[in-house]
Image (cartoon, rainbow, N blue to C red):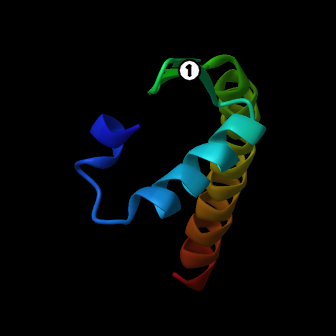
Amino acid sequence: MTELARPFKMALPSFSQHLDVLKNCGLVRSRKSGRVRTFRLEPRPLKTVETWLAGQRAHWESRLDQLDTYLADLKEQKR
């Protein structure tokens, strides 16, 4: 954990709390061997988010395309 926390400017207990949140969400797993705790990223939960975001992106790109078409039509009507 100390090695992971090194690049961040926060106290080790605060960093530990952040890791606990990630563990509770299933985004990381930890294993303790003696005094050393090793963390591993679990990307599977991120796949769910990625799928949801892709759907949202497609929806909003479609809506923005519709808005673009509508505004272009308004501009043509004013000419």
Question: At 72% from the left edge and 26% from the top edge, which residue is drawn?
Answer: 45
The residue at the point 47 percent across, 55 percent down is: 15
- Residue 26 location (% of width, % of height): 73, 30
Q: Nearer the viewer, residue 26 or 73?
A: 26
The residue where tag 1 is placed is 32
Residue type at the position of mark 1: Lys
Decide which of 77, 52 is in the foreground and name it: 52
* Residue under the image location 61 percent in, 19 percent down: 42
Instruction: Specify few, some or many for label 1: CA neighbours under 10 Å numbering under 14, 14-19, or 20 or more.
Output: few
Between 55 and 21, the residue placed more toward the observer is: 21
Q: Which residue is pictured at 45% across the width and 27% down the height?
A: 35
Position of 69 compared to 49: left or right? left
Query: Residue 59 in the image: x percent, y percent?
Result: 75, 44
Position of 67 relative to 75 (above/below): above
What is the quadrant of residue 68 in the picture?
A: bottom right
Question: Is 3 situated above or below 12?
Answer: above
Does residue 30 lie above or below 68 as drawn? Answer: above
